[in-house]
Image: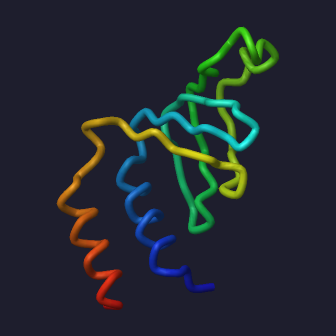
């Protein structure tokens, strides 16, 4: 299956962030911080060394150290400030807009 251009852009970008800490906010308001272990073409995410952002609200999640997150339940992914290469994103966005 071929990915639409925007999905391929994000997939390629997320592959560059493997090994860095990210926070994934789910559609059910649960936010999990961990080391990005892998991401696939469907933007499914595997995190290691996880911790819940709001431990008081989700105490049952304290024992979870690794998790697999289905891409369709992700609301946001917060990236590390040093992990954002704005020039690469601008170039890719321009290429996508031109239809290249």
Residue 70 % position (x, y): 71, 52
Residue at left offset 57%, top offset 38%? 24
Residue at left offset 61%, top offset 30%? 32
**Number of marks in the image?**
0
Answer with the quarter of the image where residue 61 lies. Answer: top right
Q: In the picture provided, is 23 more to the left or to the right than 46?
A: left
Location of the C terminus (image quadrant): bottom left
Residue at left offset 28%, top offset 63%? 89
Q: In the picture provided, is 62 more to the left or to the right than 40?
A: right
Q: In the picture provided, is 32 more to the left or to the right than 92?
A: right
The vertical placement of 60 against 46, above or below, is above
Location of the N terminus (image quadrant): bottom right
Residue 45 % position (x, y): 60, 49
Q: Residue furthest right?
A: 60
What kind of colouring is applied to the model shown?
rainbow
Q: Residue furthest bottom?
A: 99
Residue 29 % position (x, y): 70, 33
Answer with the quarter of the image where residue 13 lies. Answer: bottom left
Residue 19 % position (x, y): 41, 40
Relative depth, front residue between 45 and 75: 75
Q: Residue furthest top?
A: 56
Answer with the quarter of the image where residue 58 lies. Answer: top right
The vertical placement of 91 against 57, above or below, is below
């Amino acid at each position: 299956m071929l990915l639409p251009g925007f999905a391929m852009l994000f997939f390629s970008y997320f592959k560059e962030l493997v090994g860095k800490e990210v926070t994934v906010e789910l559609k059910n308001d649960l936010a999990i911080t961990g080391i990005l272990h892998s991401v696939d073409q469907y933007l499914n995410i595997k995190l290691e060394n996880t911790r819940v952002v709001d431990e008081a609200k989700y105490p049952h999640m304290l024992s979870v150290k690794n998790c697999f997150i289905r891409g369709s339940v992700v609301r946001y992914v917060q990236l590390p400030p040093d992990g954002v290469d704005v020039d690469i994103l601008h170039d890719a966005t321009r290429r996508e807009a031109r239809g290249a």
